[in-house]
Image (cartoon, helix red, strand yellow):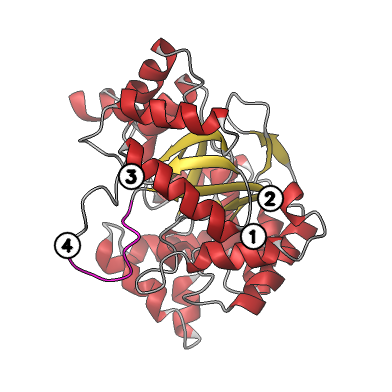
């Protein structure tokens, strides 16, 4: 495994981030424990979750599974850089959200942290992430809440997810005025089929010394050999993602042909491409089984040559820098 600093911090994290969203809804507790043990054995030390994972009516279940794994001991908690998130309501039912039980008010941040600590069975969270933008809460209030939690030792770093470039600037400029560290990373949608983050989000993150953690690195499965799997009788779920994107079937065909030409697995190429992009700390991989985890680990040692990188850019061109991409 390879390691890097998380943005401008001194924190060392693996270049793959173990995503845990499948734990509970799709992977049972025992198998989830096996995957986490295998990830740790492979050198992955950065685990990502969120308080809402498990989803209604089991919100929080994923954190509970991680907590039961920590409880097994063996320095599991000490070896893991643990990241979780808050924003969404933790109500276990659909319908109107009770006031002050979601988003990023100081009161909800405090409640959310206490709830996550209890479920995770730990007394601190390494990286506490704001899952979405709260347009109604000023950053001064958010940072006040974070300052209290840092001083209490309940969180070490604050980070963001699904924020625009100007949100990163606003957050970090406010933190600077208050004499605080600010956001240390941004978790954003970024892969070969969705490169809009290159326009402003990634440049802003790099400018403020933030790590970039891409989610959905395989584009909902499209970049994992979806057409080949469909021909073999599987991959229907991944191909359904075509309907939700502007990517054509022909682009995916060309992509799989290019990977085959180089004798490489499509999913591993997609991860290796992200690892080669400036500013990227490491993509989130959410394996449902050990085979998917092993494939992701192989991608870390994969060096893509210039010809292959150029071919990928030709099939999936980026948007170009801002403001040139939209101004002229």
Question: Disc 2, disc 1: CB below 8 Å?
Answer: yes
The label on residue 296 is 1
The front one of 68 and 8 is: 68
Where is residue 198 shown, x and y percent of the image?
A: 39, 35
The residue identified by callout 2 is: 300
Identify the residue at the far bottom of this view. Answer: 233
- Quick check: 141 above or below 237? above
What is the distance, in whole Å, between disc 2 and disc 3 at their CAs? 29 Å
Circle 3 Cα neighbour tier, 10 Å, few/some/many (<14 / 14–19 / ≥20): some
Q: CA distance from mark 2 to mark 1?
A: 7 Å
- Magenta residues (range): 88-95
Q: Is residue 287 left or right of residue 168?
A: right
Q: Nearer the viewer, mark 4 or mark 2?
A: 4
Quadrant of the rendered structure where residue 285 is?
A: bottom right
Q: CA distance from mark 4 to mark 1?
A: 39 Å
Residue found 39% across the figure and 42% down from its top: 109
Q: Which x, y percent locates residue 217? A: 48, 54
């Amino acid at each position: 495994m390879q390691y890097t600093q998380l943005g401008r911090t001194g924190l060392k994290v693996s270049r793959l981030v173990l995503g845990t969203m499948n734990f509970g809804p799709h992977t049972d507790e025992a198998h989830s424990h096996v995957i986490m043990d295998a990830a740790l054995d492979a050198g992955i030390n950065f685990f990502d979750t969120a308080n809402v994972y498990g989803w209604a009516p089991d919100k929080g279940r994923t954190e509970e599974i991680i907590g039961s794994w920590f409880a097994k001991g063996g320095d599991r908690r000490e070896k893991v850089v643990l990241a979780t998130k808050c924003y969404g309501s933790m109500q276990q039912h659909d319908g109107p959200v009770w006031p002050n039980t979601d988003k990023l008010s100081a009161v909800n941040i405090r409640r959310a942290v206490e709830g996550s600590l209890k479920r995770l069975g730990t007394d601190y969270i390494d990286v506490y992430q704001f899952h979405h933008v709260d347009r109604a809460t000023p950053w001064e209030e958010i940072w006040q809440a974070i300052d209290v939690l840092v001083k209490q030792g309940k969180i070490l770093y604050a980070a963001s997810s699904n924020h625009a470039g100007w949100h990163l600037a606003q957050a970090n400029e406010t933190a600077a005025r208050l004499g605080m560290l600010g956001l240390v990373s941004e978790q954003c949608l970024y892969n070969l089929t969705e490169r809009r983050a290159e326009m402003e989000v990634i440049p802003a993150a790099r400018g403020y010394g933030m790590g970039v953690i891409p989610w959905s690195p395989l584009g909902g499965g499209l970049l994992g050999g979806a057409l080949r799997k469909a021909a073999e009788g599987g991959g229907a779920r991944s191909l359904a993602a075509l309907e939700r994107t502007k990517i054509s079937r022909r682009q995916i065909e060309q992509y799989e042909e290019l990977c085959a030409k180089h004798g490489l697995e499509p999913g591993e190429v997609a991860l290796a491409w992200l690892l080669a992009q400036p500013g990227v700390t490491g993509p989130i991989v959410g394996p449902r089984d050990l085979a998917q985890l092993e494939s992701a680990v192989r991608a870390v040692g994969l060096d893509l040559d210039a010809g292959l990188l150029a071919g990928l850019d030709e099939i999936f061109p980026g948007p170009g820098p801002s403001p040139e991409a939209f101004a002229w």
